[in-house]
Image (spheres, rainbow, N blue to C red):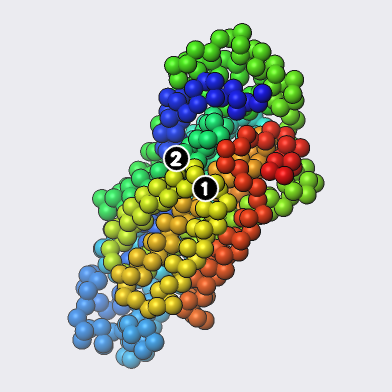
């Protein structure tokens, strides 16, 4: 008798699990707003240099004024936006005039253009660096001190940091605060996700895991809407921060993970929570019967494993290989999906519409995750979607198409990657044993954060060969789709509790 058997007696995936499912869409939004929201928050609008002799304050100029005032670059077929001409001599620019298409973004506020344009990529890099640290450190903290406690602390700090960003005096303050925010949202996401998964019976874990994908769909569309209606980046940042406020109510709405409490030998508190879950699911579970079941769990040494670390897990050959594959898989998926996401401003069409479409196209991701993931298992579907995503990324280069088809194939690839990420979360949660689960998910987040951090820099390689960034993404995806076959199939299996269970799992 294991903990999964006890979960089945509480009503399986009932009212309590659905409550957790929808409640954790909100904290997932905080992560999405921080990572994907930077696309709208920092987007650089069209701009031109303002010469010291110019009285015009509007961006648009006629062809004659452009010809006499700016250098024409034959390589880009555009007039220079970072310099001006003074008696046919190209001069350095000190002041700029911006197109008002995107309102007053961070790029306008702090002039993150021309020689300072690297600060946009640096913002994304440091944000993801914070996620990397948060995923590893707070994942370990969550295993040691509890999912709920770490989640609530991170929610409080997220609100404080988000508010502080509004009062930043310069871009360097924002960089520091964004890094710290990345640290805490990573802890919120991993602790909340694991709490939901640990409260779900084996056959419903893919369904439980789709909470992140549903959140991504809804909140990515909201980013496009919020960006459109927000006149300045401060209004947008205020909206992002406000989503942390409902999380403070989770102190009363969400219980600690009973599975984690059992692993910490807090049997009485675990029993109380299990009875509350059964009551909420409208299932009668007698206290005396539960006592005997919990005794059985403890007697078989499934409920009282000692706290373990990733370093200890690496001593086990099978676990070591599986951990390394999961880290590589996370790196690949997040490098690819954020590479696509942060390249959206370069796609043709309206930025806000494209961002909304990024959310809309993930509706198919939800469907192609839920049904095949429940019927065909994890490995086959992950491998299939990795290969399809790789093909779709290269298709515009194999067969050159109009801009609308480039957008179509880009988003088709994103659908497959989004579905794969959702399945990979379920796969990771099922492979890592309880004593290591949150630390393992934290390390996966760290690898994903590293991939997200380096992904914007892939597109600097297109100066050597235009398809090169997508070719690299393709190589990573094909490698991941192949390596996943070295992992055990986890669909419908009981979660491993100890490192020894993890080593023998799927043998």
Residue 318: mark: none
Quadrant containing the N terminus in the rendered view: top right
Separation (CA) of disc 2 from disc 1: 20 Å
Q: Secondary structure at mark 1?
A: loop
Report crowding for label 2: few under 14, some 14 to 19, many 20 or more residues within 10 A (C-alpha): many
The picture places residue 22, in percent across and down from the top left corner, at 41, 34
* Mark 2 or mark 1, whichever is nearer to me: 1
Residue at 44% in and 33% down: 21
Lateral position of residue 58 relative to residue 297, left or right:
left
The picture places residue 130, in percent across and down from the top left corner, at 57, 50
Number of marks present in the image shown: 2
Q: Earlier in the sequence, mark 2 or mark 1?
A: 2
Does 335 appear above or below 245? below
The picture places residue 441, in percent across and down from the top left corner, at 61, 43
Nearest the viewer among 260 and 182 is: 260
Residue at 42% in and 50% down: 368
**In contact (CB < 8 Å): disc 2 and disc 1:** no
Does 344 appear above or below 374? below
Determine if residue 195 is in view. no
Q: What residue is shown with label 2?
A: 211
Determine if residue 74 is in view. yes
Does 372 appear above or below 243? below
Q: Secondary structure at mark 2?
A: helix
Residue 376: mark: 1
Nearest the viewer among 179 and 48 is: 179
Most extreme residue toward the front is: 375
Nearest the viewer among 429 and 285 is: 285
The picture places residue 12, in percent across and down from the top left corner, at 50, 26
Quadrant containing the C terminus in the rendered view: top right
Residue at 69% in and 25% down: 303
């Amino acid at each position: 008798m294991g903990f999964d058997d006890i979960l089945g007696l509480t009503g399986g995936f009932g009212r309590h699990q659905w409550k957790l499912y929808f409640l954790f869409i909100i904290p997932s939004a905080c992560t999405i707003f921080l990572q994907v929201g930077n696309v709208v928050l920092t987007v650089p609008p069209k701009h031109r240099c303002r010469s010291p002799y110019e009285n015009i304050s509007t961006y648009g100029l006629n062809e004659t004024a452009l010809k006499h005032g700016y250098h024409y670059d034959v390589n880009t077929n555009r007039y220079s936006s970072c310099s001006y001409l003074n008696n046919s001599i190209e001069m350095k620019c000190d002041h700029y005039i911006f197109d008002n298409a995107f309102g007053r973004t961070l790029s306008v506020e702090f002039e993150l253009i021309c020689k300072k344009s690297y600060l946009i990529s640096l913002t994304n890099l440091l944000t993801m660096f914070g996620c990397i640290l948060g995923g590893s450190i707070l994942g370990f903290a969550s295993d040691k001190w509890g999912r709920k406690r770490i989640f609530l602390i991170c929610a409080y700090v997220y609100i404080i940091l988000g508010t502080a960003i509004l009062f930043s005096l310069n871009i360097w303050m924002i960089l520091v605060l964004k890094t710290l925010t990345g640290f805490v949202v990573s802890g919120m996401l991993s602790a909340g996700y694991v709490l939901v998964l640990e409260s779900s019976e084996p056959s419903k874990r893919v369904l439980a895991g789709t909470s992140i994908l549903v959140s991504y769909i809804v909140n990515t569309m909201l980013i496009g809407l919020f960006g459109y209606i927000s006149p300045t980046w401060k209004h947008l940042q205020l909206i992002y921060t406000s989503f942390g406020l409902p999380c403070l109510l989770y102190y009363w709405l969400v219980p600690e993970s009973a599975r984690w409490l059992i692993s910490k030998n807090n049997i009485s508190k675990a029993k109380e929570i299990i009875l509350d879950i059964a009551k909420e699911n409208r299932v009668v579970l007698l206290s005396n019967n539960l006592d005997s079941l919990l005794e059985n769990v403890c007697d078989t040494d499934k409920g009282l494993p000692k706290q373990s670390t990733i370093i200890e897990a690496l001593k086990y050959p099978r676990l070591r290989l599986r951990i390394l594959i999961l880290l590589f898989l996370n790196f690949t998926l997040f490098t690819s999906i954020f590479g696509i996401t942060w390249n959206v401003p370069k796609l043709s069409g309206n930025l806000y519409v494209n961002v909304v479409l990024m959310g809309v196209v993930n509706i198919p991701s939800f469907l192609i995750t839920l049904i095949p993931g429940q019927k065909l298992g994890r490995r086959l579907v992950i491998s299939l979607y990795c290969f399809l995503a790789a093909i779709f990324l290269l298709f515009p280069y194999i067969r050159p198409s109009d801009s609308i088809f480039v957008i179509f194939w880009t988003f088709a690839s994103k659908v497959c990657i989004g579905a794969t990420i959702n399945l990979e979360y379920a796969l990771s949660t099922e492979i890592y044993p309880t004593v290591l689960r949150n630390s393992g998910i934290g390390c996966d987040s760290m690898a994903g954060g590293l991939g997200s951090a380096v992904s914007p820099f892939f597109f600097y390689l297109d100066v050597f060969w235009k398809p090169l960034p997508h070719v690299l993404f393709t190589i990573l995806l094909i490698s991941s789709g192949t390596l996943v076959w070295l992992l055990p199939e986890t669909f419908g299996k009981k979660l491993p509790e100890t490192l020894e269970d993890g080593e023998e799992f799927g043998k």
